[in-house]
Amino acid sequence: MKSVIGLLLLIGVAAQAAEMGTVVRAVELKQKPFIDAPKVMDLQEKTTVEIVLRQEAWVQVKSKDGKTGWIKMLSLRFGSGQAAAGDQVGGLLGAVSVFNTGSSGNTTTGGVKGLTEEQIRNATTNSKELAKMEANAVSSDDAAKFAKAGKLSPGKVEYLPPKS
Amino acid sequence: MKPEFFLRAYGRPILHAAALGALLFGGGCANQGGGMSGGMGALTIENITKIATIGQKAMESQHEVTEAEEVQMGAGIASHLLGAAPLVADAEMQRYVNRVGRWLASQTERANLKWHFGVIDDADINAFTTPGGYVLITKGLFYKLRNESELAGVLAHEIAHVVQRHHLKAISKNSGKEALGGLLQLLADNRGNYDSQRIANALKGASEVFIRGLDKEDEFEADRMGVVIAARAGYTPYGLVGVLQTLAATGSNAPTLALMTKTHPLPSARLDMLEAAMGDKLDNLDKRVSDVPRFAKFRK
């Protein structure tokens, strides 16, 4: 029994140390984060990879045999709600299929009622904190200066329909 | 199609009837600004009674809450949430989050609202938004973020809820029109005093929305809008994607995600929906920012 707990702890630690993901479909591992970059190798559907670096739409990953390259960020999945994903994708247990394609009815399945839920129910209003929050507000001009300092340049982008 | 809320500064009881009058008798399209007042001439006591019975369906789909009322209610609910968990006592962090949030909000259709943002002292991973532009994220969530564009992704998702008035819609649906009207009346009568027992009780009812959650479709819509709002503000639209991947990797059984899991679609489902909507559409935007060095100062 003790050793089982020990193993579980070990898995937990291993999963924390490196972030792992599972490839959602067969994709090419690219040398660079571009669609037309040369291919390093093919990654089969459900291959587990280690996340190295994130860069906008792309993620640098390392395959099990140590090859590094880039895939699209949205080609990766990290778990379903069936079990803690960190327990599944750590490699020690193998890559269990962890896909959930958005089937309905799962929204309110969380069984454990967190402390926060009770805290919300039992709360009483706190006007002093509200006043603080309101005092923290900044003007749109202030925010624009802040954006400029961060080299953020605004642009026109249309909202997306549900399916592109 | 956006939800239909009418922001008008009329008195409420007359307003309901007037809006329905316009819908049922005036023939005016309520989407077009001038339609509603045009219907008022058709109103008699008899008609109002008729409307009250046959117009129930229309009533349920129409929410005539003024912006001032929405903000007042939102402030009250924020006060209730802050009673559950106060702000993190770090003025610099609070100002930072307000600046990121305000900049994002400036890129939306409700840029002129007085927006408020805050980080609350709660180790769970979650975010709460109230009507009228009060956005709270937990420090548990803040400390999970990798960079400023992920913070922007979270805030933009919450801002989208306010732009679409998702919580107002849900509160109205949960509590019923009568209770919502009662709450608004109470707030109007006790301007600025959210601590009276009656108001506190009414706000408690409205705050149930954070335990029940929103309609799943509203969450998916807020994700789709959130990535665009972030992109409009100059951030990579993939910040929110990174956060959802973090949540998925954390696992929905994690105690820190209990309430989030109960009230939101699973992160994997949200990623599927985002992928379907985004495709490659937002991949070739010019000069999008993933991080700004100032973010590092607030990491744990």
Image (tube, coloured by chain):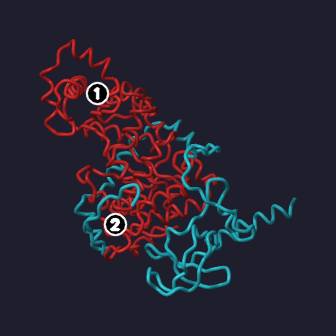
Q: Give coordinates of residue B41: x percent, y percent.
A: 12, 22
Coordinates of residue B103 in the picture (x, y in percent) = 30, 62
Taking the spot 42% from the left edge, 70% from the top edge, the residue there is B295
Report the side of B68 relative to A44 (left or right).
left
Front position in the image: B206 or B294 = B206
Chain A: what color?
A: cyan
Chain letter for mark 1, please: B
Q: Dot 2, how many residues are within 10 Å of its Cα: few (below 14), some (14-19), or many (20+)?
A: many
Residue under label 2, please give it. Answer: B231
Which residue occupies 43% across, 67% down? Answer: B238
Which residue is nearer to you in this view: B199 or A43?
A: A43
Task: Indicate left or right for B159 with B246 as reference.
Answer: left
The residue furthest top is: B46
Within 10 angstroms of label 1, few (less than 14), some, or many (20 or more) residues?
Answer: few
- According to the colouring, which chain is red? B
Give whichever of discs 1 and 2 has the lower sequence position.
Answer: 1
Q: Which residue is mark 1?
A: B189
